[in-house]
């Protein structure tokens, strides 16, 4: 199992364990995810930078893991990737370090929220070869 999968599985398991099981909070069910992210997207990007240093460090580690996994995939395939698609790109937090590591490649960020895509346009301003698409994956 790759490091990325292990990290994601562990983080998700801890989140659900603490919030839903230990605290007895019922798991939310989103009826309409587009309206949820349009509402949340207005504050999402700004709130990311107000997180405590430990959360910011976790996000930096996750970004590093993604870059490492892509480097490993390129090594195994023995050829560079020419295009990368980020499904649910949000405001581009995971996309930016990848674009900085491999400039000049084609990138597509897909998200269902126009508000999050507007934040991505601001956060990723000046990044070449980027296409942002509003769609549901």
Image (cartoon, helix red, strand yellow):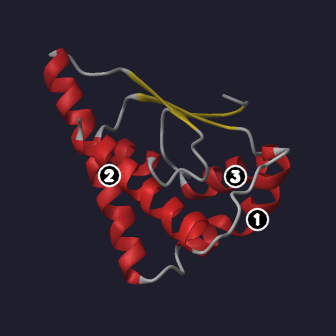
Q: CA distance from mark 1 to mark 2?
A: 28 Å
Classify mark 2: helix, strand or loop: helix
| Among the 4 quarters of the image, the one containing residue 95 | top left
Up/down of 16 relative to 34, above or below: below
Task: State left or right for residue 111 relative to residue 31.
Answer: left
- Quarter of the image where the C terminus is located: top right
Badge 1 is on which residue? 42
Badge 2 is on which residue? 7
In front of the other: 74 or 123: 74
| Residue 123, horizontal then vertical, whole percent | 56, 58
Q: Which mark is residue 116?
A: 3
Q: CA distance from mark 2 to mark 3?
A: 25 Å
Q: Going from the N terminus, do you reach mark 1 or mark 2 first? A: 2
Residue at figure coordinates x 79%, y 49% from the top left: 30
Classify mark 1: helix, strand or loop: helix
| Residue 17, horizontal then vertical, whole percent | 49, 63
Task: State left or right for residue 118 relative to residue 10.
Answer: right
């Amino acid at each position: 199992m790759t490091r990325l999968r292990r990290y994601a599985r562990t983080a998700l398991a801890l989140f659900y364990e603490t919030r839903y099981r230990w605290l007895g909070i019922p798991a939310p069910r989103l009826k309409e995810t587009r309206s949820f992210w349009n509402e949340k997207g207005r504050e999402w990007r700004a709130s990311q930078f107000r997180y405590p240093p430990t959360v910011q460090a976790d996000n930096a580690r996750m970004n590093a893991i993604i870059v490492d996994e892509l480097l490993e995939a390129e090594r195994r395939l023995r050829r560079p990737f020419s295009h990368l698609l980020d499904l649910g790109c949000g405001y581009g937090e995971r996309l930016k370090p990848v674009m900085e590591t491999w400039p000049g490649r084609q990138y597509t960020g897909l998200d269902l929220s126009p508000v999050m895509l507007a934040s991505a346009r601001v956060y990723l301003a000046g990044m070449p070869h980027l296409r942002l698409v509003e769609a549901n994956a």
